[in-house]
Image (cartoon, rainbow, N blue to C red):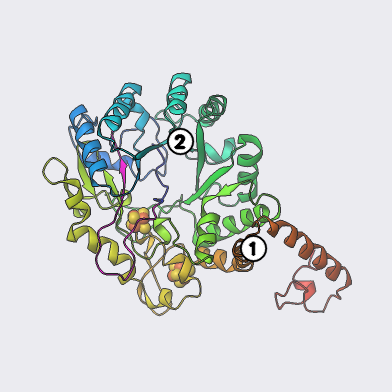
Amino acid sequence: MSCCYNSHMTNTLPTAGAERVPPAAFHIMLKPRGAICNLDCKYCYFLSKEMMYPGSRFRMADDMLEDYTRQYIEAQQAPEVTFAWQGGEPTLMGLDFFRQAIVYQHKHQRPGMRIHNALQTNGTLLDEEWCRFFHDNGFLIGLSLDGPRALHDAYRVDKGGKPTFERVMTAARLMQQHKVEFNILTTVHAANADHAVEVYRFLRDEVRTQFMQFIPIVERDNDTGYQEGEKVTNRSVTGEQYGRFLIAIFDEWARRDVGRVFVQLFDVALAAWLGERAGLCIFEETCGAALAMEHNGDVYSCDHFVEPRHKLGNIVDIPLLDMVRSDQQWAFGQAKRDSLPQYCRECEVRFVCNGGCPKDRILMTPAGESGLNYLCAGYRAFFNHIDAPMKFMAAELRAKRPPANLMRHLAQRDAELLRLFAAAGRNDPCPCGSGRKFKQCHGKA
Ligand code: SF4
Ligand code: SF4
């Protein structure tokens, strides 16, 4: 599978609470090969979508590719347009399909418009020819890699159950040799969630990537593959685990990698602390500008809701823009804010969290209201943990100084704390400010 767990980067959503305005630009995850994949990742939410198209060849036809390219470009009012290729595994379409896609993009491109291509892949089919093509055409590649060998291979196996780590690492090396721009998408699940720093250092020091995304696996335990039922599989990360995972990586990053390594969630958080839009749909107040299109032209409200009740239509029958502007899509997007439980409305980190993605809202609040995010405990712990450093970086940016000054600031603070720890008595309050006795906190060891 293409590991399309990544959430949609978009800064073109209609403003929450504003009058109804169609988005000036929107984003569609394209699935030219549908759910077909050469791997069999245990936690993949998309493989089951194959059942929705019995008898299909799962190949986007040439006329569909051109029709989509034309409609997608015509519908955008923004000067930059991104084609997002996903799956299943999009490279199973073969290179000629993408060469043709570029031909159609050039054919329908408006003067002054810039077109980008982003492709999410498991990497196992990449070779020199693919890499040359990606480089020559400026593709941004998302490569799925869950950490060092044992952690990656825990769930990311091929159809024969064989590990894939070696093949993915080969793809990373090939892309580096060919100067292909890529980032690593790491899903966080039961197998790697307790190894945060190990995963982070592996990506930074051995894969030598500067761009990382850490996406939580919250996998519904049902037979339909739809977002229904309240049980999750035991491969899923827990909310608390996800919070600890992010905190451990943030603490390492904040002390040595600010400005050198870019973790999507940290950038998104900093935007929120600066009072800007998050730019990542899961933390926006509303959604609805990030859709998905299947190989046959069927359009759905979101990549995570490719299911009959969220189908908007087919681009052969209904113009794409009409579906994007439809009442159904508007309602889908607004429901994210309108269904937020009181517990979230009163939460101190709502400004950055906004209740998270609706697909994960399966818990009850302490007061018994439904719609609390499964990851709430993790989000709340993480966003509170980073409050002070985020405020520091935001202030530096406002003063036109580099946020990387955080590293020096923390080094000074850590040195001061060490001095205080050395002077603290066992029954004194811990100098870290936890409120606990020193012997029960940093003095424990
Ligand atoms: S439901 Fe909304 S927040 Fe969740 S992935 Fe889809 S667009 Fe993003
Ligand atoms: S941290 Fe929890 S309570 Fe706060 S907004 Fe997010 S999901 Fe809601």
Q: Position of residue 8 (x, y in %)?
A: 39, 50
Compared across the picture, whether 13 is left or right of 332 comes to right
Q: Residues within 10 Å of mark 1 (few under 14, many from 20)?
A: some
Which quarter of the rendered picture does the C terminus lie within? Answer: bottom right
Which quarter of the rendered picture does the N terminus lie within? Answer: top left
Q: Amino acid at mark 2?
A: Ile
Q: Amino acid at mark 1?
A: Glu
Where disc 1 sits, the SS reads helix
Q: Position of residue 33 (x, y in %)?
A: 29, 32
Q: Residue at x 17, y 42 (%)?
A: 315
Name the image quarter holding residue 56. Answer: top left
Q: Position of residue 287 (x, y in %)?
A: 33, 59
Compared across the picture, whether 318 is left or right of 375 comes to left
> Of circles 1 and 2, which is in front?
1
Residue segment shown in magenta: 10-32
Q: Quadrant of ligand 1?
A: bottom left
Q: Any mark on residue 396, and which?
A: 1
Compared across the picture, whether 107 is left or right of 216 comes to left
Q: Residue furthest right?
A: 423
Residue wearing tag 2: 141
